[in-house]
Amino acid sequence: MNIMILGIGNIIFGDEGIGPHLANLIDEKYEFISDEHTVKVVDGGTLAQRLIPIITEYDKVILIDCVNVDEGNIGDVYCFDFDKVPDYITWQGSAHEVEMLQTLQMIEMMGDLPPVKIVGVIPYVIGEDSTFSMTDKVVASSLVMEKTIIEHIKSLDIGVRIKKDLVITDVSGNTFLKGFQR
């Protein structure tokens, strides 16, 4: 089975860059061990529909992104399957969220969407200003998101080894250098 961990978001809008930052952390921190399965970590940035041919190559996708939640608070973490999105999850946030939702819906309409697990956090939305810095709440929440993703990977009978002991702030300053690498 081919599994992709896909980070989505815009790193110049603070918390909305959690997807690429966390994807890069996982890529640098962990090694995935399996004779049967492969795990690829991809920083998808804001590519959305340009990711369609890549997403369809995988058997499972773990998507890291921001979510909006009715009655939620900044830093709250949610994990759910794309085919069972809870009613309290809304997609009326930034443009990249809407584009990613539309991208997944398009792939689903074509019948090519692999199972997608979404691990999302409520960001502080900064509007039109830009910053590379994430809020303390989302930085703290990244630990919960990371643990959730690693536990899910382990549940698929994939071994996980820490290559380098890192936290998200160790890699977030270099995310712009890595960008989309396939």
Image (spheres, rainbow, N blue to C red):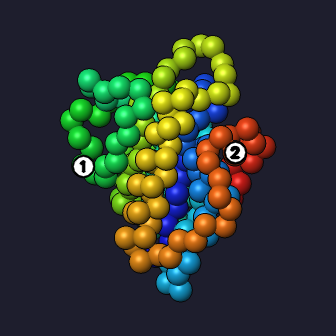
Residue wearing tag 2: 170
Q: In this view, does 35 lie to the left or right of 151?
A: right
Residue 127 or residue 56, whichever sits in front = 127
Q: Which of 9 and 141 is in front in this view?
A: 141
Q: Nearer the viewer, residue 50 or 90?
A: 90
In the image, which is nearer the foreground, mark 1 or mark 2?
A: 2
Residue 84 disc label = 1
Outermost residue on the top side: it is 128
What is the spatial separation of the Cα atoms under label 1 and label 2, in whole angstroms? Answer: 34 Å
Asked if one can make out residue 86 in the rendered structure from this viewpoint, the answer is yes
Q: Dividing the picture into quarters, in which one does residue 110 lie? A: bottom left
Q: What element carries label 2?
A: helix
Q: Is residue 130 left or right of residue 54?
A: right
**Residue at the image position 47 percent from the left and 75 percent from the top:** 158
Horizontal and vertical percent for residue 89? 29, 34
10 Å crowding of disc 2: few (<14), some (14-19), many (20+): few
For residue 57, above or below residue 121: below
Task: Tell which residue pokes out farthest to the left in this image.
Answer: 87
Of helix, strand and loop, which one carries label 1? Answer: helix
Could you say where residue 163 lies in the image, as x and y percent from the top left? 66, 67
**Disc 1 marks which amino acid?**
Lys
Q: Point out which mark residue 75 bears.
A: none
Q: Residue at x 37, y 34 (%)?
A: 76
Identified at 37% across, 70% down, the residue is 155
Residue at the (74%, 48%) spot, across then down: 178
Q: Can residue 16 be seen in this view?
A: no
Q: Is residue 130 above or below residue 56?
A: above
